[in-house]
Amino acid sequence: MKPKFFLILLALVLTVVPLFSMCKEAPALQVKPIELKVASFLPMTDHQNVTLKRAFDKVEKLTKGKVRFTYYPAQTLVTAKAAFEGTVEGRCDIFNGALPCYNPGRFLLTSVIDLPPNIPSAEVASVVYWDFFKNNKLLQNEWKEVKVLAGHVQVPHDLHTTAKPIRTMGDLKGLEIRTVGVAVHMVKAWGGTPVFLPMSEAYTALQKGICDGMTTNWGQLKANKLADVLKYHTRVGVFAASFFIIMNWDSYNSLPPDVKKVFDDLSTWLPREFGKSWDRDEAAAIDWTMAQGGHTMITLTPEERAKWVKKATAAAAAAWLAGAKARGLPGEKILDAKYKAIEKYIK
């Protein structure tokens, strides 16, 4: 071996070996997590946001920190009415709690879920109706511009009034009742005058006498301080709104395959978790409200409640079917499928 060649080879060895050793000892590069913005119209303390955060904490662990969530509650990023558009446009990556009833007509077919008769248990309702949604392409098509991660159904609404106790349908005559979605037709059928207002405006409207009452679940009485102004509570339970957790398609498609799988799996267990949360929150809210003093709970007789349910069911179904027919949609087929989905439970 020529001396010059040997010296060159030796120099290369002395250079490469230390570099190789340094590479072996160097720590692995930290991959920056994917940041996802989660919007909601509810405060962070609301049980829906608590439930979702618990679920997303689990997602962060399952993905080994590949994703990280930042929360924007109480309409700080996207409003309730703009939930769908805001998610489609990418103002948020995920919206927790998009309601068909806040966009009358836009999700006409999906709103069949909200029609009475309702399932008293939110846990059962959420599981039954999520399965119904997953197996109905026409409903899914209304949401095709977003990735639907999961859906759930709240506990049925009761009727709450400020100054007048409601024991019969006749007591509602002349009263203005804040309500939403298909419940508008129910209130009309009962003899009241429906008024649509965002939840954020309900307290002031009730306080100033613009509205005489509202349909809502008991949880809102505490969360939005409505127990200050609503003193009479008639147990009706014939309207329950559906909610959906939706995601921007670009945000979803940008995820690695293993992370997508974790998001896809949410639909197998999250609807039930939300349903359980609704049931727990409602029971606690009823106890809390009645413990405040000055509140009257009114339980209708079975005969009287049957009249309310019959009127509400007929009026809401007729209005919904008319809307579907006007658009050339198979309303009767979808309504029949909904009834079959809950038939076993109702029996």
Image (tube, helix red, strand yellow):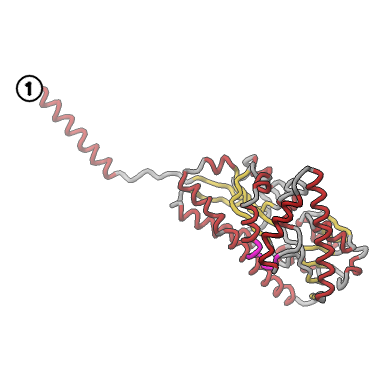
Q: Residue 190: x, y in percent? A: 87, 64
Q: Residue 220: x, y in percent? A: 72, 64
339 relative to 165 in the view: left or right: left
Residue 121 part of the magenta segment? yes
Q: Residue 20: x, y in percent? A: 24, 38
- Disc 1 element: loop
Dot 1 alpha-carbon crowd within 10 angstroms: few under 14, some 14 to 19, many 20 or more: few
- Residue range in magenta is 119-125
Image: 71 above or below 209 = above
Q: Nearer the viewer, residue 118 or 180?
A: 118
Amino acid of disc 1: Lys
Image: 24 above or below 162 = above
Residue 298 visible from this viewpoint: no
* Image label count: 1
Q: Residue 162: x, y in percent? A: 84, 68
Q: Quadrant of residue 12?
A: top left
Q: Quadrant of the C terminus?
A: bottom right
**Circle 1 residue:** 2
Residue 138 visible from this viewpoint: yes
Q: Nearer the viewer, residue 55 or 170?
A: 170
Image: 60 above or below 226 = above
Q: Quadrant of the N terminus?
A: top left
Q: Quadrant of residue 132?
A: bottom right
Kindly identify the residue that appears in the image at 55 percent across and 57 percent down: 268
Residue 140 part of the magenta segment? no
181 relative to 34 in the view: left or right: right
Kindly identify the residue that appears in the image at 77 percent across and 64 percent down: 238
Q: Quadrant of residue 194?
A: bottom right
